[in-house]
Image (tube, rainbow, N blue to C red):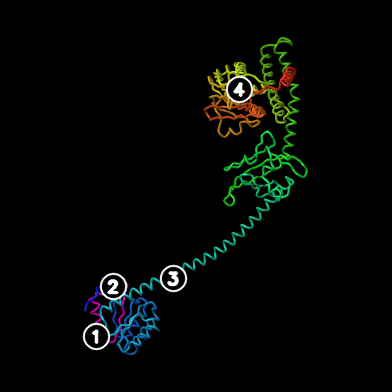
Amino acid sequence: MGIIKFGQNINNRSNIEIIVVDDDNIVLDSLKTLFEIENIKNVRFFNSPIDAFKFLKDKNNKPKVVISDFLMPHINGIEFLAKVKTLYDDVSLILLTGYADKENAIKAINEIGIYKYIEKPWDNDRLILNIKNAIERNELILSLKDKISKLDKANKELEKYSFNLENIIEEKTKVLNDTNLKLNAIFENCADSIVLINKSGKIHRINQEFEALTGLCKDIILKKNINDLICATKLSLKKKITSCIDNEKNVIVRDYETKNKINEHIIPLEISIAPAIIDDNPEYILVIRNITIQKQMEKLRDDFIATLTHDLRTPLLASIQTLTYLIDGTLGEINEKQMKFLKAMKATNCDMLGLVNALLEVYRYEEGKLNLYKENFYINEFIEKINEQLESLYITKNIKVKLCLNQTRNKQVFADKNELRRVIVNLCGNAVKFSKEDGEISIKTSILNENDLKLTVEDKGEGINKNELPKIFNRFQSFEVKRDENLKISNSTGLGLYLSKKIIEAHNGKIWVESRKGFGSKFTILLLNSVNVKNNNDNILEERKSEILKV
């Protein structure tokens, strides 16, 4: 009879125990011999089922397999294995029976759950194979129980988490609903108009203040484009509100207005435009403020300044004229000390008069009360003459001026000569002011698109800080450049560049600056459609000259 070499595999399982119960010692000895041959260890043999059951009651003695004979005194094998089943329901049970007990064995398998029954006399190979399968079955059952236990634990944790999650969701939903109610209340009752649009300007949502602002009902507004309801203050700009959109940052604009359809009032607006992503689509939130009161206050302030400065001109002119008479000796001889003080007084009064005149010019431009008197003139001769007039200013710092005018040779420009002179003189004066000793300034002209004049004034001076560049053309904006501990340069009242911008814009042109700290600045003027223009303003020009002569 062949022997299956299985004992070595079983022996490697350190936690395996086999319980064998049989009242026949010959059977027990036979099994012991077989297990020794197969090198099967961790086996306990009992010839009394009562002793075996006492041993098994100790939970530390839990076996993998229990093998029991059927016919035994006091208790048969089926009853014994049934009691073992009550202790350990996962242990594999094997019943040894005679041929006559086969029917009872089959009944025990069905009722008790015995794993196998083996008829005597048994085949050793079959017995070892059944023991192997019984051990593997036990381990599979234990593994399955462990997984079921873990699964139950996970299910309980999941149920607990699910319960907590429902509470959290309910709580968060309540908070979200409360927040939405508050936001809707803010949106609907905000003192400013709020409008939600897409990139093309289609209106998606509005609050009730925007209805009041436009004098239109919500249903009509939602069918319109924002550009239909809001337009630029200056019709010459023709700039749509959607052209001000920036996808990365907020933008604030003021040069826009709307017309109330009920009372026909024109309402000036200040608009803040902010990008937002709503339902994965780019949208834009417009916060629109009615600035009628602010405009009225600005008007009162500007009118006050204009009246005040206008009234200051006469006494200042009189004072300057009187000081001139004293200085040139018309009113008698004065000593050197008196002369020094009188000249200082005259210089101060002249500075004040310059500020007053600048304020008046700004006021006239903002109110649209200053008309441009355009004429055709040769731009090269015009710039060369200005350069000669500023020669004394250049000498103070030994500034070298480079004129690059070849592209505009024999080219005429149609513009207000006096106002353009004011701009160029201001740019050149600033270039000198912010240049170092023995510095260099270049003035360059060129023609773009056959009809546009481009003029640049560039210096190699101190330059402008990056954060100051956006404010440089603002009214009353003054900048200081510190070269050393004792020297500071300031661009005075801060009206020169502001007024220059107004003059160029009145010419339908543009002015901008490029600068880097320590590398100088370049101011550029672009006058659109100003070259080779027919002059139709001869009569107006004569009136302008007469007006200038009277002044």
The answer to whether the residue labelled 4 contacts the one labelled 2, judged by CB atoms less than 8 Å apart, is: no
What amino acid is at disc 2?
A: Ile
Would you name the residue on which mark 2 appears?
10
Q: Position of residue 109 (x, y in %)?
A: 37, 83
Q: Amino acid at mark 4?
A: Gly
Q: Considering only order in the chain, which callout, 1 or 2, is on the residue closer to the N terminus?
A: 2
Residue 112 drawn at (x, y percent): 39, 83
User: Which sits in the foreground, 396 or 22?
Assistant: 22
In this rendering, position of residue 291 left or right of residue 101: right
Label 3 vs 4, first from the N-terminus: 3
Q: Which residue is the site of mark 4?
A: 429
Residue receiving disc 1? 26
Dot 2: element: helix
- Type of amino acid under label 3: Ser
Q: CA distance from mark 3 to mark 1?
A: 43 Å
For marks 1 and 4, the one nearer the N-term is 1
Q: Is residue 439 above or below residue 366?
A: above
- Please state the horizontal and vertical placement of residue 333, each as a whole percent of the image: 71, 9
Residue 316, image x and y in percent? 73, 21
Magenta span has 80? no
Q: Earlier in the sequence, mark 2 or mark 3?
A: 2
Q: Is residue 350 left or right of residue 434?
A: right
* Classed neighbour count for the residue bearing mark 3: other residues with Cα under 10 Å, few (<14), some (14–19), many (≥20): few
Residue shown at the point (57%, 63%) measured from the top left: 167
Q: Which mark is residue 149?
A: 3
Q: How far separated are the C-alphas under marks 2 and 1?
A: 24 Å
Q: Which residues are magenta?
A: 13-39
2 and 3 marks in contact (CB < 8 Å): no
Q: CA distance from mark 2 to mark 3?
A: 27 Å
Q: Is residue 52 above or below residue 400?
A: below
Callout 4 crowding tier (Cα within 10 Å): few <14, some 14–19, many ≥20? some
